[in-house]
Image (spheres, coloured by chain):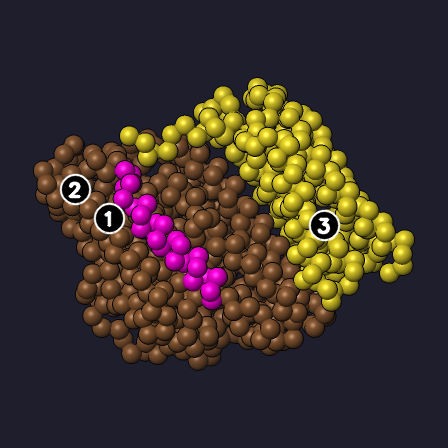
Amino acid sequence: MDGLSFDIAHLLAGGLVLVSFLMLYQDRLYALLNIFALHAVVLALSVAWQAYVQDAPHLYITAAIALAFKAIVIPVALHRIVQRLGIHREIETVVGIGLTMLSGIGLVALSMVVMLQVTAEADPLAREDLAFALAVVLIGLLLMTARRNAVSQVVGFMSLENGLILAATGAKGMPFVVEISVAFSVLIAFIVVGIFLFRIRERFDTVDVQALDRFRGERP
Amino acid sequence: MSAIPFDPVAFILAVPLAAAAILALLPGYRITARINVAAMFLTLASAGLLFVADRPAPNNYLLVDDLNIVFVALNAFVGFTTSVFSATYIGHELATGRLTPTFLRFYHAMYQVLMFAMNLALVANNIGLMWVAIELATLTTVLMVGLYRTHEALEAAWKYFILGSVGIGLAMFGTILVYMAARPVMGEGVGAMVWTELMVRAGEFDPALLNVAFVFLLLGYGTKVGLAPLHAWLPDAHAEGPTPISAVLSGLLLNVALYAVLRFKMLLAVNEGAIAPGPLMVTMGLTSLVFAAFMLYRRRDIKRLFAYSSIEHMGIITFAFGMGGPLANFAGLLHMTMHSLTKSAIFFTVGHIAQVKGTQQIADIRGLTASHPWLGWGLVTGVVAIAGLPPLGIFMSEFLVVSSTFAREPLLAIPLVGGILIAFGALFYRLNGLAFGEPRGPTPPTEASHAPMVAHLALVLVAGVYLPPPLVVWFQNVAGLLG
């Protein structure tokens, strides 16, 4: 692999981590959804670049899924759900923004230290991709735990999954990448359609997880 | 024996899948409940044939060996008895209007899809395929847990979904790392994800990468096993879903996730440079055991009580497999089998109890042995078994776990025995109120099928008194494989 294609792959993967950070400090749902769409676009570019560099045309399918489904369909659907259900537009945080950002930086440092040490023998592109991917996964986890709204938890899960797709495409020649991205898309579609439209709207006027937390059958 | 004209492996996968399609289309409760039972019976028969038929040579996707046959047979058996229990249980739910016919159709189809997914995860010879199957099983159970669409059921399904997805995501990352470790040795492509081929070459993999991969896999699949501190979804999912699903979750799905961990443990054992996975599993197992034992005391909901007891027992099983060696592995396998049978039997009785009493609150249930002798004594027997009293099967397997631990690591035996005794006390403290004393609340006559519960408890009793030698040989063989 020559220097330029390596640099571009690096740039795109690093961009994904950066966009993950953008998601961490959003306090409006619509803004969060827009940033997530950007996240998916960067992922699609990164996967398409990997497809080109590795000469693996099936990865273009994964890129197309990321672009069409995650950058367009899901954000639009979530926008409409937020509108239709009249969900609070502000995101309620568990931990303050500053602390969340600091933890995010810590997680990125952790994933660099762990992955770069462990994969010393792997080829440089795969190992740095993997380090970035782990950072995206961990920030996704952080986003899920540090936010109370169900919608932002779903967005956190989807960004986590983007990190996994990045790792899977970075692992050269890995089989089932397309199948896995389809499986994940089905999972996400299930959540968005099933849980929100059919289940939660029937009984709740809010999709705030704290409102779901009202009763657990344990309190006297 | 090549006299059998079909491939049992194909059958244990095709029967549930075909049944799911049929059940999704057919209306009517009686006929679909019967088809559900019939399909599970066919699956059980095919699983039985696996023992006698020629094993197909492992290909890139499917594998049958001594280890997974045990899991498949257990899966098919408990799946079958649960479908018998489910038929009466669901009839009552329809009569009381908690379920509508549309949701019933959905329920039966999902039950079969779950069976398909679990069987696929067990016979998969491919780490990617196994991951997909476990994801499918998670998805179907999430939908079933939310089936009643009450506040509590939705909250439980949501929590299960979030934690389950995180677990599945971490497991995916671990799977990718295993592939990355295998690729330099085995080349690109499907070959580097096939168990049988990975096991041959695992000694040459990069140990550091395998170590990190195992941590992710243990955390990921460990979430699904319900190991503390990743167990938070489990009590809610058990308490709020339909009881047949609680039985299948506790009895089977936890085992399937543990099977995945065991496969990766075997992979690491082949590589000399990799960390020993045992201590990690021992720590998580003991934490779950002790934590769940204490949590048992504060339960007010009967299904939650037994859900925490499942965490406790999965802790013991993980501990036993983490200790490793022929005796501890044997004990772990036996304990897993006994726990599946006993816990699903308990959920069968608890399901009927909650139906006749109209509540799951422990405080509102009193004197069951007087008002409903079958249910009451069934529950007593089940709790005696699960608490580990002789002569039932769990006593024997717990005794083996404890004695093998004493022989090798006496210090670890202290928290192990402590946890078991604490749980024992909690279970009997609760049982006393539930089963004895003056009956309280409504005592309508039961419309229950006792056969599945009796069958399970009879097997547990027989296993406690006498284990047939072929079974012992088989388990010893598998325990040797597990290393």
Q: Mark 3 points at which residue?
A: A132
Residue B160: mark? none
Q: Seen in the image, is B284 located left or right of residue A80?
A: left
Q: Mark 1 points at which residue?
A: B426
Q: Write down the colour of chain A.
A: yellow
* Residue B346 shows in this picture: yes
Amino acid type of the residue that numbered disc 1 sits on in the rendered structure: Ala
Q: Tell me, yes or no, whether the highlighted magenta stretch contains residue B299.
A: yes
**Alpha-carbon neighbours of circle 2 within 10 Å: few (<14), some, or many (≥20)?**
some
Q: Examine the rendered structure and indicate whether residue A213 appears above or below residue B269.
A: above
* Residue A163 shows in this picture: no
> In the rendering, at what x and y percent does residue A159 appear?
66, 41
Number of callouts:
3
Q: In which chain is the residue bearing label 2?
A: B
Question: Which residue occupies 65% across, 38% down?
Answer: A102
Task: Please give the range of residues in magenta.
Answer: B278-303
Amino acid type of the residue that numbered disc 2 sits on in the rendered structure: Gly
Q: Are marks 3 and 1 in contact (CB under 8 Å)?
A: no
Which corner quadrant of the image does residue B173 belong to?
bottom right
Question: Which residue occupies 33% across, 69% down?
Answer: B410
Q: Is mark 2 on a helix, strand or loop?
A: helix
Q: Seen in the image, is B276 located left or right of residue B207?
A: left
Say which chain is brown.
Answer: B
Q: Name the residue under label 2.
A: B433
Of all residues, the one furthest to the top in this rendering is A86
> In front of the other: label 2 or label 1?
1
Which corner quadrant of the image does residue B359 belong to?
top left
Q: What element carries label 1?
A: helix
**Alpha-carbon neighbours of circle 1 within 10 Å: few (<14), some, or many (≥20)?**
many
Q: Are marks 3 and 2 in contact (CB under 8 Å)?
A: no
Q: How far apart are marks 3 and 1 (CA)?
A: 47 Å
